[in-house]
Structure formats: structure tokens, C-alpha cells
Image (tube, coloured by chain):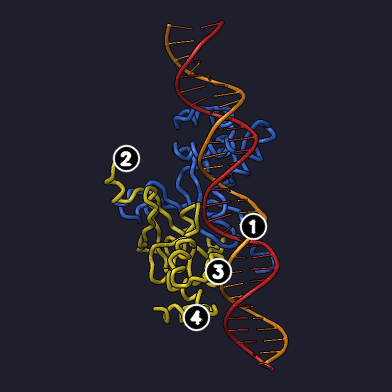
Chain colours: A blue, B yellow, C orange, D red
DNA sequence: TACAATTTTGTAATCAATACAAAGTTATGA
DNA sequence: TCATAACTTTGTATTGATTACAAAATTGTA
């Protein structure tokens, strides 16, 4: 899997350092749409010299090169997604979990915006209460 | 127009102070999806005692009561929209302007997420370069 | 008027993200 | 191999939007 992440970086034109491969691998193996800080905390035990700044730098580079996507669903912290295929996201306002929402007809959703706008990024965001939280009290 | 904003607040169950009416009126008459600070700066000359905190408090109250919407399209600052009818948004990554994107079939977009998720808020966000910026150099 | 409830205000604190420059690493060519 | 250039990582300091908090002001009510 590390090998796969390395390969993927090269394809995207990113020089594969140890830190970059680790961040990319984390995003390919965790579908949790993590924040920069979550990624840092997960990798720090394995790479004790790792700096938070490096994680931020790496994520920005990965986004620039189109290797990963940012999710703007949570206004406080940017979340990152290693799955660049088109799909929507659901944020539970109570527990904060983000789930993928499959889109059967992605071309339709992408095509809603006028072509003149030259769209490069489409996000479809849902917010609400997830089933698990709905069962809890304080509805 | 002030009268209309006042009326609207009462309908939404919000006690209409001078400050709240001013914020609500601003959002009803400006389709620019302003930030909290832009609203503060616009109202300050008219209401010299106005505090930034009051603008934030008011906006949060308006959102809670469903009188306005937040847009999460810009990760840095929250933007607000006084038009609560369903429509998409386009953010120009160069000039920062946000435009409305009409949605012909809103029920389809809303219905993409599974009903079990209990969705309360749907956002359809596009990013790219607007026509005006596309004509400029540095493409 | 008096008292309670609500709202507004200003300052201080929070915290994600960036700026910056020094230290470390990798690549290139003689 | 060595020297030098180019790039990457790191830590600290800073920025800036937003919130916490408590005092002051306003409004509602008996």
C-alpha cells in the first residue's frame, strides 16, 4: 500500500518523500475525510520528527496537483478526501461524522452550472442527523 | 424594506431589535453572500454603536431559526445568504465572487441522499474561474 | 417605579492555518 | 568525490475569523 501511494504521487507529478507518501497512504486507506490535525496525530508515532507544518504543506501540494480533494462541509476545519471520484457527502451535525453519498448521475449534477463558468470543482453537501444519533435522546 | 425585514423576523420567531432588523434587511437587499465582517462594515456608519459580536450573535440566531442560510463554499470565512430557496453557488477562485446557480430540478438534487440520513440542509457548490477573470492574463 | 429578562457591547481568548527562515536532504555536474 | 544548487522539512511566530464572558444597556411586566 505504501508502494501504491508512492506510485500515485509520481503519476501526479509529486516528488515522493517519506512524509508525502505517508500522508497520501493515510488518505488512500482511511475513508474518514480526516482533518490535517487528525492526519498529523495518526502519523506522528511512526514518524516522530514529523511537523504539523509539513502535513499542511503536503496536503496543499496534493490538492494543487489534483491528487486529493478538499471538503468545505465543516466550516471550522478543512477536511481531505483521497477518493477523487465524484460523490456527495453527508455531515452529521450531532456526531460530526462524514459519510459518502453515491451519485448515480454525476454528469447531471456537474452540468447544472452554466458552461461559461468554467467549473473545476463540484461539491454536493448534505447536513442532518445520522440514524445512530437520531435514536439517541435530545431529538 | 426595513418594514419587510421586521415582518420577516417576527414570522421566524425572532424579536426584532434595531440591530437584528438591520442585519436581516442587509441580507434581503444584498445578494452578494456577504461575510459577517462585510455586514458589520456596511452597517457601522449607520449604527455607530454596533459591535462585531452583535453581528455574529444575530447571524447565528437567524441561522438557528431558519431565517437565513450559511454557505460553506469558502473555507476561511462563513458566508450568509438571505435567499433560502434552493439554488447552487459558484465561487470564482480568482476574484472570490459568489454567484447563484439556478437549479431546474431541486427535488432531484435533494433526493440523492438516502432518506434515512434525515437531511436538513443541502448545498451544491461549484468552484472555478468566472468569465471576467478568464479573459484576464495569467490563465 | 422596581425588578426580571433579554440584548448589546468590548475585551480577551481560542485555534486552524500560514509566513518565514533556518536546518536538513536530494540532485546535478565538474 | 566534492561543491553547489534546488528542494523539503521543521519549529516558532503571526494572522485572523470566531467565540467566551461579563458588564452595561435596553425592554418587558407587575
Q: Mark 1 and mark 2: span between their CA atoms?
A: 43 Å
Quarter holding the C terminus of chain B is top left
Q: Mark 1 and mark 3: span between their CA atoms?
A: 28 Å
Q: Nearer the viewer, residue A35 or A32?
A: A35
Using the rendered view, name the quadrant where residue A30 is placed.
Answer: top right
Image coordinates of residue B63 in percent, x first then y, are: 53, 68
Q: Mark 4 and mark 3: span between their CA atoms?
A: 21 Å
Q: Is residue B122 visible?
A: no
Mark 1 vs mark 2: same chain?
no
Image coordinates of residue C22 in percent, x first then y, are: 59, 28
Tell me the mark number nearer the camera, choosing from 4 and 2.
2
Q: Chain of mark 3?
A: B
Relative horizontal placement of residue A49, taking residue B134 as reference (left or right): right
Q: Chain of mark 4?
A: B
Among numbered discs 4 and 2, the one appearing first in the sequence: 4
Quarter holding the N terminus of chain B is bottom left
Tell me the mark number nearer the camera, choosing from 4 and 3.
3
**Labelled disc at residue B67:** none
Q: Nearer the viewer, residue D8 or A90?
A: D8
Mark 2 — residue? B138
Q: Chain of mark 2?
A: B
Q: How many marks?
A: 4
**Labelled disc at residue A95:** 1
Residue at disc 1, secondary structure: loop
Mark 4 — residue? B11
Q: Mark 4 and mark 2: span between their CA atoms?
A: 49 Å
Relative horizontal placement of residue D18, taking residue A109 as reference (left or right): right
Residue found 38% across the figure and 46% down from its top = A120
Amino acid at each position: 500500500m505504501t508502494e501504491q501511494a508512492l506510485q500515485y504521487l509520481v503519476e501526479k507529478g509529486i516528488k515522493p518523500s517519506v512524509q508525502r507518501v505517508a500522508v497520501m497512504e493515510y488518505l488512500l486507506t482511511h475513508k474518514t475525510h480526516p482533518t490535517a490535525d487528525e492526519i498529523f496525530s495518526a502519523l506522528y508515532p511512526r514518524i516522530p520528527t514529523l511537523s504539523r507544518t509539513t502535513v499542511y504543506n503536503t496536503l496543499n501540494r496534493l490538492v494543487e496537483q489534483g491528487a486529493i480533494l478538499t471538503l468545505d462541509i465543516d466550516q471550522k476545519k478543512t477536511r481531505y478526501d483521497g477518493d477523487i471520484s465524484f460523490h456527495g457527502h453527508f455531515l452529521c451535525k450531532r456526531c460530526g461524522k462524514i459519510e459518502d453519498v453515491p451519485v448515480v448521475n454525476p454528469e447531471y449534477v456537474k452540468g447544472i452550472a452554466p458552461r461559461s463558468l468554467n467549473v473545476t470543482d463540484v461539491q454536493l453537501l448534505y447536513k442532518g442527523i445520522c440514524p445512530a444519533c437520531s435514536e439517541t435522546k435530545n431529538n
